[in-house]
Amino acid sequence: MIGPRRLSGWWHRLDVTVRDLPLGLLILAGSFLPALHGNGTRVGDLPTRPFDALTALALGLECLPLALRRRWPALCLALVSLGFAVDQVRAYHSVAGVALPLALLSTGAHLGRHRRAAALLFSAAYVPLAVVLHRLGSGGETASEFVTFYLALVLAWGAGAWLRSTRAAEAEHRRRVAEDTRTAERARIARELHDVVTHHVTAMVVQAEAARYLTAAPDRLDQTLTAVTDTGRLAIADLRHLLDLLNPDHGTGTGTDGGVRAPSAGRLLTLVEQTRRAGQPVEFAEEGMPARSSGSADLVAYRVVQEALTNALKYAHGSRTSVRVRHGAKEITVEVGTDGSGSAAVPVGGSGRGLAGLRERVDVLGGEFSAEHAPGGGFVVRARIPAGNPS
């Protein structure tokens, strides 16, 4: 047995003219019902005539073109209008007359080009029809009644035009949302690459520069080169993880990683040790235990420490640096301070790309972020990050 979803999918795969044809056939069939004869649209005061040999042609011309109402709306309107004119002049007054407002509605909704010309041609064609019907009738139909019927047809066109503008506005809204989403995703990826690459490469450059002056001390040279190697491996691991996050199968159960890896306290300690091996004296202190449902707060805290240590390596290399992280029940606070003369070059206040990205991340979670010069000539980065936000 074919299920409703499969049947719906099969139906929507059919050509649009095939899907629109049943409507015309239904109206055509209803027009031949004896009980409905003479109960259709009546323009003018001609008495209703019985069906004759021309009836099938007139009603078919009036109903069957509705199959074209979305594929070729202008042709549909022209054929339906011609059939409607024959219907009214022959005074069949069948229910097939409802095809005309349907054709106008569809033309207003689906006609993409020459809309004004189509409206003018239809209006111009209505005038001789009204004159003919008035002359064939007894004169009881006044001009105001013809105008009223014309305004009803204009209303059908206007309803279609409104539907068209509504669909266009929705499509534009979806396009803008998609573009904003892509822009935000590119910015997020750029921040992640900046955080990962800048820190590891900076550490490797500093370690490699130090190795140049250790040729006379093989043991220290070996330690420095080992530190460069370890830093490179960490960079590769972080980049691989970032690429896993970009995998379309990530988080669907088919990828290699089922969720976002939130750096733990052990990862923070590894980060501090890596910075120490690059020649930066770092004091690390941690209070409390990370909450199980901290959401994105752990990752943001890790990035704050990472960026601050990167700036310390770049602008205050060799100066004493302190890292303090406190895990609370509802928030994580981070403070990274550096002493030294080189700190004046640090882009405090969020003017640097890394610090600006951190400020944005913390703001998204509803926290507070600051990066400023310390009174002793160094700099200090502080962040208060609410925990439990899964974004």
Image (spheres, rainbow, N blue to C red):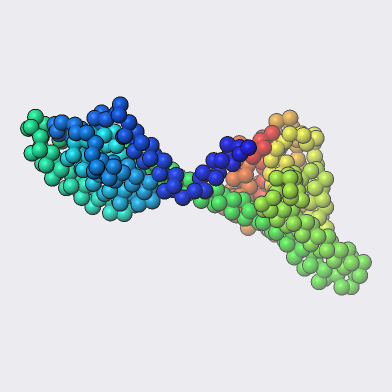
Picture coordinates of residue 272 (x, y %)?
80, 51
The residue nearer to you, when weighing 278 against 2, is: 2
Q: Is residue 382 left or right of residue 169?
A: right
**Which quadrant does the C terminus fall into?**
top right
Q: Quadrant of residue 102?
A: top left
Q: Quadrant of residue 36?
A: top left
The residue nearer to you, when weighing 195 against 219, is: 195
- The answer, for residue 309, to whether it is visible in the render is no
The residue nearer to you, when weighing 389 against 46, is: 46
Q: Quadrant of residue 109?
A: top left
Picture coordinates of residue 387 (x, y %)?
69, 34
Of all residues, the one furthest to the right in this rendering is: 219
The total of numbered circles placed on residues is 0
Picture coordinates of residue 199 (x, y %)?
72, 57
Which residue appears at 14% of the width and 33% of the height?
46
Which residue appears at 38% of the width and 51% of the height?
71
Which residue appears at 83% of the width and 45% of the height?
266
Picture coordinates of residue 144 (x, y %)?
12, 32
Of all residues, the one furthest to the front in this rendering is: 53
Of all residues, the one furthest to the top in this rendering is: 35
Which residue appears at 56% of the width and 40% of the height?
7
- Up-down: is 141 above or below 212? above
- The answer, for residue 273, to whether it is visible in the render is yes
The residue nearer to you, when weighing 104 against 300, is: 104
Q: Is residue 87 left or right of residue 18?
A: left
Q: Is residue 40 left or right of residue 253?
A: left
**Which quadrant does the N terminus fall into?**
top right
